[in-house]
Structure formats: structure tokens, C-alpha cells
Amino acid sequence: MEPAEERGMNRRAFIKAGVIGTATAMIAPPAFADTLQRMAVSDSSPFPEPVYRTLGRTGLKITTVSFGAMLTPEPEVIRVALEHGVNYIDTARKYMGGKNEEIVGKAVKGMRDKVYIASKTLPTSQSKADIIRDVETSLKTLGTDYIDVIQLHNLTDKERIFNAGTREALTQLKKQGKVRFCGVTTHKNEVEVLSALVDDPDKFFDTCLVKFNYKSDTSVSNAIDRAATAGIGIVAMKAMVGGYDVSGLGRITPFQAALKWVLQNPKVTTSIPGMKDMAQLRENIAVMGMPFSYADLRRLERYNEAIAPFYCAFCGKCEGGCSHGVEISTINRALMYAEGGYGDISLARATYAELPKQSTAVSCVDCGNCAARCVRGLDISAKMSHARTVLA
Ligand code: SF4
Ligand code: SF4
């Protein structure tokens, strides 16, 4: 693996020597390969020099902008990122019903030793047998002998961190060399999850993929600070606050600003924006090494105003007020997958389908009790009604 300090000329020389042309030719049609070749040799290439940080106690040196593959339909986009120095890819057993790992596997073919792969077991997996089955399936689908970071998917509290069966499975997989490091992911109750990782006397988990963006509470920033100081590698997700359509804001695009805001925190090793195509790849990767500016702050303020009427932070603070047990935050997250920048109705419906039937929007009786508790003043019952239409 290329060390952190090794940047710039070596990487550029690597690219100009024609690696892009030959490598992509294996997986791309000729016209696409020509386009990539022109991009690679152009002096006005939009791709910056990679910038690396260390992923906590794993010691892995990874790019500050990494590749969130959950929405990427073609391996070529990932491949271009890798050939320009991005060296960490995040996928999951769940994404695209398993197909996403297949796409990542194709993208890393021939350069596995230059790339770190992070995947996730299924959100419902807890027993030793479940975890081993998931990892074995991921290895096969990715076409690799090992996964660099395997993560427990979507923790909403600390319980699964201490699950004995899960730990037995991960310990066995590590001994077999099939897994190098273990982590968790969380969108909700981030402080509880991060704190449990730090306070765990066994220090079993090394990384946390955590929702973190300019709208996150200070308590989350503080928990990230504490976790990073304790050696937990911090990977930020949902940096773009849903990536909602901002065409109404004219030429102002807040997504680079949102990414810069996250990366200005030195406790965050990297972020994994989801990238569907070359335009999104260019937009995101360009942020590496850029400072957060006053103009960025103004962009975020305008974006904030635009999304305020519908943005849910998944904080869960409204849920205690629902006597029907509706999992409002998860339902709103599923709606975001359908209607935000993700535009992925399959992912939205899969996320919704993970909920027990009694916790879905079907159980909402439109009583309105939760609306008073929403810290953002959202009309929750209207959102639940909308969810019944969109996600059922
Ligand atoms: S409006 Fe629906 S989600 Fe809100 S408290 Fe009532 S039943 Fe629960
Ligand atoms: S609806 Fe409001 S209170 Fe409930 S999770 Fe979303 S932002 Fe939090």
C-alpha cells in the first residue's frame, strides 16, 4: 500500500504512464477508455493530489475523500477514483441486494493491494453463524481473500457492540486472515454508540462510520473527538445532509461546502460520499486539501434554508412521544434515500422493509403527538402518510 507521504509526482507519473488506459481497457468500452485517457493526460485535470489521514489505531493511511459505492452502478467510476489515488471504498452486503459488492470487486481487480475495502454485515445479523455467513458471502462476491474493515451495519444503541456471538465470529475471521479490522456504523444515537466503543474494556472495534455533517449536534462532535483521541478511526457519512435537489438555489452548489465542513475536523479521517457518476466523482474528489471558507458557510446557510421544511436529522427525539411505536427516524431516512440525492427507491424500500411491520408508517394513526416533539418542527404525520404511499 502506498504510504501517506507518497503523493503528487509519483501518483501523477503513475497515471501518465498510461495505467489508466490499460487498466480501464479491461473493463470499459473503447469510447469510455478514450475519454478517461484524455482526462488523465490533461493539464487541466480536475483531480487533485490525494491527501491522506490515518484511520485511528488501524494505522491505515487513507484518502480524506473516499469512495462511497452504495449507489454506483458501474465499476468504471470507482476505477477512475482508484487510479487517481482514492484508496478506501465503502460497500455493504445489503447494498443493491449484494450486487454492489460485485461492482466493487470488478473495480478493484488487478489492484487489490493498492486499495482498502470496507464492507458491512447485514443489519439483522447477530449470531456467530450469521456473521460468518455474511463475511464468507462478501469475500466471494468481492472476489477477494480478505476484507480490510468489516462493519456491523446500522447500530442504534450499544447492545450489538457487546454481542458475544458477533465477537466470536469476528475473532475467528480475524484469526483466519479473512478480516483485518472491525468497525460499526451508526445513524442514530451516535453518542451512545461512539461512547461504548471507547469505554469497551476489550477495545474490540477499531472504526466507526458515523453520520456527521454541519447539522450534527455538538454532542456528536464531542463524542467523535473523544473516540478519535482514544484511537477509533472516524469515517463520516451523510456529510451532504441528504444531497437534496438545489436547482432552486441557482448556481450555488452546497455539496462541496458540506464535505469541506466535515473534513475541516482533523478528528475525521475520511468521508465516503456516494458517487454515481463521473460528475459526482469530480465534484467530490476536488475537495481534498481545500479549506472551508466564508463562501462555503454562505452556501450552507442557503442550503439549510431550502431543506428546513422537510429535513429530518434522524435524532429519534420524537419517537418517545409515539404510543404506536412508529420508527419515525428510520422511515424518514428511507424517504431520504428515495427523494434526496440518492434517488434510490430500491434502497429506500429495502431500508423500510427492515422495520418490523408494527413500527412502519402503517401504524401511524395521525394523532400528531410526535409533531410537538420534533426538534425541527416537522409535520411528521404528513411524512408518515407520504411514506405509506412511496415506500409500501
Ligand atoms: S402522528 Fe403517527 S407517528 Fe406521530 S405520534 Fe401519532 S401515531 Fe405516532
Ligand atoms: S422527525 Fe424531528 S425529532 Fe423526529 S427524528 Fe426527525 S428531526 Fe428528530
Image: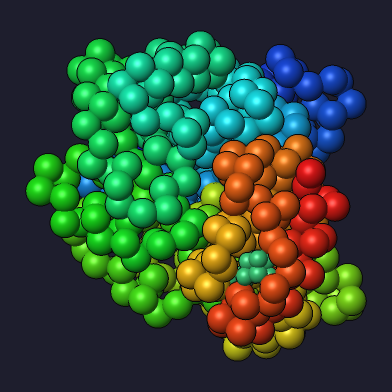
Q: Is residue 260 above or below residue 37?
A: below
Seen at 58% across and 31% down, the residue is: 94
Q: Which quadrant would the N terminus be assigned to in this image? A: top left
Res 80 visible:
no
User: Looking at the picture, how far across and down is residue 27, in whole percent?
Assistant: 73, 18
For the image, the number of numbered tags is: 0
> On the rendering, which quadrant does ligand 2 occupy?
bottom right
Pick the front one: 324 or 142:
324
Q: How is the image coloured?
A: rainbow
User: Residue 312 location in percent, x, y?
Assistant: 64, 69
Q: Is residue 236 above or below residue 248?
A: above
* Along the line of sight, the residue nearer the viewer: 187 or 280: 187
Q: Residue at the spot x=54%, y=28% of the render?
A: 93
Query: Which residue is the extreme one toward the left?
Result: 201
Q: Is residue 219 left or right of residue 375?
A: left
Q: Position of residue 206 (x, y in %)?
A: 27, 44
Q: Is residue 229 left or right of residue 117?
A: left
Would residue 139 be found to the left or right of residue 343 on screen?
left
Question: Which residue shows up at 69% across the image and 76% down it?
Answer: 368
Q: Residue at x 36, y 54 (%)?
A: 157
Q: Nearer the viewer, residue 144 or 96?
A: 96
